[in-house]
């Protein structure tokens, strides 16, 4: 019996068998081997390695198969707090030995717009993205809640759900007059200051020291050189005295 077989090699092998006399068709061994050899040659022509090693973006990673051959795919990802921007999240090794697409970058996630507090302002620049830090300042006569400071630094971080959020944002409230009833002891002079207490004491001439001039001092005038048989009067001034 005779049979006619027609093969098309590119891109997929198709076989058409025309039966002439009976329901059974015999294919010659040589023809079969020829077809199989053609298939192998086609596969060799298609599968090519991609020699370029794809590098991970800053704050990210890239995962590739070991061989990096035709149709193999590399995938990009970003670290927590960052997102893929531009380029391709996946790149495929093509039959010409080159990767498809282009490499992406990893950009920090944005934070919600940080509003300026009432009786204060937001100091610029303020990037407003993950791990960036911005400064809030109060107008003259106002301080931050629970402190006597006029400035606060807030940072864009992540919640347990990996959502961006600003750290503790405080309000600006009217400053209490710290020196209206002077906290300074022993004649110290009170003045306003941008610190935790809201004031500072000048203890000059009081023979006291400390935040509120509460610590007494013992002051000995310089004695100088002493000689044998020579007497010198040494003056010693000390506090506290009877008023403490």
Image (cartoon, helix red, strand yellow):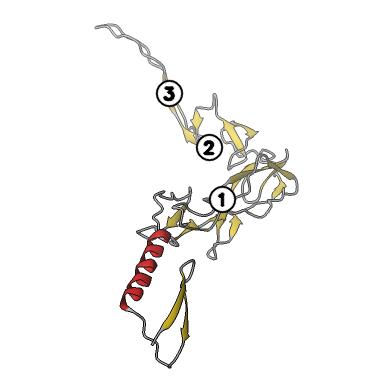
Q: Quadrant of residue 65?
A: bottom left
Quarter of image, res 205: top right
Dot 1 corresponds to which residue? Answer: 107
20 w.r.t. 29: above or below:
below
**Label 2: which residue?**
211
Q: In the picture provided, is 110 more to the left or to the right than 51?
A: right
Residue at 62% x, 51% y: name it. Answer: 146
Task: Say if 244 sits above or below 203 in the image.
Answer: below
- Marks 1 and 2, how far apart at CA: 47 Å
Tag 3 and tag 1, C-beta contact below 8 Å: no
N-terminal of the pair, mark 3 or mark 1, is: 1
Label 3 neighbourhood size at 10 Å, few (<14), some (14-19), many (20+)? few
Of residues 116 and 221, which is closer to you in this image? 116
Residue assigned mark 3: 219
What is the quadrant of residue 111 in the picture? Answer: bottom right
195, 138: nearer the viewer: 138
Residue at (46, 88) in percent of width and height:
20
Percent of width and height locating residue 18 = 48, 84
Horizontally, residue 177 falls left or right of residue 155, namely: right
Mark-to-mark CA distance, 3 and 1: 62 Å
For marks 3 and 2, give the CA distance.
Answer: 19 Å
Closest to the observer, 31 or 78: 31
Residue 36: x and y, percent? 35, 71
Tell me residue 79's x, y (percent): 48, 56
Residue count near mark 2 (Cα–Cα under 10 Å), binned few <14, some 14–19, many ≥20: some
Local SS, label 3: strand
């Amino acid at each position: 019996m005779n049979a006619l077989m027609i093969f098309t090699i590119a891109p997929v092998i198709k076989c058409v068998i025309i039966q002439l006399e009976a329901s059974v068709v015999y294919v010659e061994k040589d023809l079969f081997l020829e077809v199989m050899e053609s298939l192998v040659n086609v596969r060799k022509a298609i599968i090519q390695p991609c020699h370029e090693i794809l590098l991970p973006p800053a704050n990210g990673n890239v995962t590739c198969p070991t061989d990096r051959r035709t149709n193999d795919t590399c995938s990009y990802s970003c670290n927590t707090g960052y997102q893929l921007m531009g380029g391709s999240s996946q790149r495929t090794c093509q039959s010409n030995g080159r990767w498809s697409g282009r490499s992406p970058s990893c950009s920090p996630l944005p934070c919600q717009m940080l509003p300026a507090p009432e009786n204060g302002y937001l100091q610029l620049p303020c990037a407003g993205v993950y791990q960036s830090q911005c400064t809030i300042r109060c107008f003259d006569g106002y301080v931050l809640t629970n402190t006597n400071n006029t400035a606060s630094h807030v940072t864009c971080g992540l919640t347990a759900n990996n959502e961006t959020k600003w750290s503790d944002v405080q309000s600006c409230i009217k400053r209490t007059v710290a020196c209206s009833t002077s906290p300074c002891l022993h004649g110290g002079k009170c003045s306003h200051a941008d610190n935790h207490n809201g004031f500072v004491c000048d203890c000059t001439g009081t023979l006291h020291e400390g935040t509120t001039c509460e610590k007494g001092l013992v002051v000995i005038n310089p004695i100088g050189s002493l000689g044998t048989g020579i007497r010198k009067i040494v003056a010693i001034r000390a506090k506290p005295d009877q008023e403490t």
